[in-house]
Image (tube, rainbow, N blue to C red):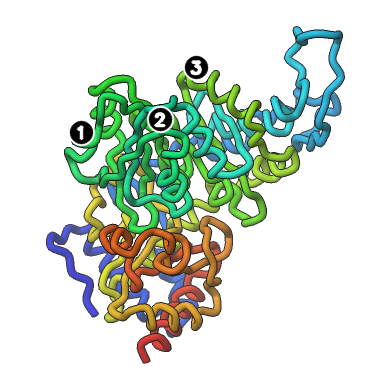
Amino acid sequence: MPYHHATVDPIVAGRVLVYDLILSLMISRQSLTDLRLHETTSSSAKCSQQGLLESAASDTTTAMLAGQSSDKWDCLSVTPPVTMSSSFKQPGPGPSASKACVYSKAGNPSRNTLEGCFAALEGAKHCFTFASGMGAITTAILLLKKGQHMVVMNDVDGATRSLFSKSNKMDIEVTFTDLSVPGNLEKSIKSNTKMVFFETPTNPVLKVIDIAAVAKAAKSRGDIIVVVDNTFLTPYLQKPLKFGADVVLYSITKYLTGLTDVVMGAILVNDDIIADKLKHLQCVAGIVPSPFDCYMVNRSLKTLPLRMERHKESALLVAGWLDMHPKIVEVLHPGLPTHPNHDLGKRQMSGHSGVFSFRHCGGLKESKKFLYALKVFTLSVSLGGYESLAEIPWLMTHAFIPEKERLALGITNSLVRISVGLEDVLDLLEDLDRALRIAFG
C-alpha cells in the first residue's frame, strides 16, 4: 500500500522509502540493522532534515550534573544519598536561621536534589514535586480563588477531565473548549478568567496546541496564568516556559521515571510570586513524594535523553508502518507529515515521544480482538515506561466521559492508544502485524 502525500519533497520522499522498507523488514532482522545504519545519523542532522527544533546539546550533561555535586554531602558521595529522616536537628529553638531542613514535608535533601536537577533540565527557576501528577494538577487549581474561572482544553487526560468537571465543588468555574481552533480561547475568556490549562500534544487524540499563541491571547486579556501539561514530551522534547507558559507540570510517573515503578508529579515555574504560593501549598497540603521515590526519579533522569531518543525513533517507525496498513484509517502522530499540526509541532517540539493513537476500520469487536492478540505490547493504561503498552480510551482511560462528548472529541471505539517502549522495533512491528491479522482475519 503506497504512502501518499499531497506535497512531496525530498525529505518526505525519503520517509516514504523508509516506510516501504519497513514492510520487507518483517522477513529479516538483519534488514532492520541495515536500515538503522542508513537511517540513523547524528541527532542534530536528523533535526535539521526534519525541520524540528534541536534538543539542547547540554540537556544530557545537565541531567548528569545539575544538583548532583558531591560537595553537598559530608561523605563526598558521587551518587546522591537517600535521606529518609522525617525530622532534622535544629541549631536552636524557634525559627531556624540556617538553610538546613526542618521537617520533610517542607523540605528534604533527596527531594531538593531532584527538584534542583529537574528545574535545570526545564530551564526553570523553581521546581516543586508532588505525590502524583494529579496532586500537581490539584495544587495548580488551588492557585485560583473562589468564584474565578478557568479555560481548559477539551481533550485532556481522563482523570484531569474528571477533576475539572467537578471543580464547581470548589466554586471554580470551568469552560472546556478546543484550543487548537483559532479564536476559541478568546471566545471563552470571561472577566473572571484567571487560568488556561491544556496538554500538548493532547490525550488521546494528539492535537498540538500553539503554546505561544495561547500565551499571547491570554496575556492580552489580563492576568491569566497559562498552565501546560508537558507529560507526553518531557523537557527533553519541549520546554513550554520558553514559549510563554507560566506553569508547566508533569506526571513524573510516565517518561521522567521511565521504569513504571514510581508515582509522582511536578510543577515548574519562573515567576517568584507563583513559586511562593506553590511552596506554601506543597507544604500545607502535604502532597509530597517520599525521599526514596525522589532518589529513584533523580536516578532515572540520568538516562532520560537516551530513552527519549529511542522512544522517538521507534515510535516514528511504528507510526509510519501503521500509516500504510490497509486496516488503519488514521495515525495520530505529530511527527508524520500527514498530521494536521505537523508544522506547528516542528516549531515548538524537538520531536515526539513514544505515545500516539491510531484508528482502524473496524469497531469495538476488532479493537478488543486486536488488544487480546498482542504479545509484546501489554494491555494497560499509563505510558512512558520501558515497556510498550496499548489501550482503548473508549473503554479505559476516558470511559467515564459521556458518550456524546467522547464522540465529539474523536474518542471512538476504533481508537487505540499505544505507548512504544524500548523493545526491538521489529518485535513491535511483528506483534502489531500479527494482532491486526487476528483482529481482521
Return the residue at label 2. 241
Q: Give the residue drawn at x 22%, y 55%.
A: 340
Numbered badge on residue 11: none
Which of discs 1 and 2 lies nearer the camera? The answer is: 1
Left or right: residue 208 compared with residue 137: left
Disc 2 marks which amino acid?
Leu
Q: Is residue 42 visible?
A: no
* Number of the label disc, if any, that sits on residue 186: 1
Q: Nearer the viewer, residue 239 or 393?
A: 393
Provide the secondary structure element on which disc 2 rests. helix
What residue do we see at 34% from left, 28% from top? 244
Q: CA gap, disc 2 to disc 3?
A: 14 Å
Q: Residue 374 location in percent, x, y?
A: 50, 79
Report x, y in % for residue 145. 44, 25
Q: Quadrant of residue 415?
A: bottom left
Res 9 visible: yes
Q: Residue at position x 79%, y 36% from top?
A: 81
Against 382, residue 77 (above or below) is above
Q: Which amino acid is tagged 3?
A: Asp
Crowd band around label 1 with a 10 angstrom C-alpha radius: few (<14), some (14–19), many (20+): some
Q: Amino acid at mark 1?
A: Glu
The residue that mark 3 highlights is 272
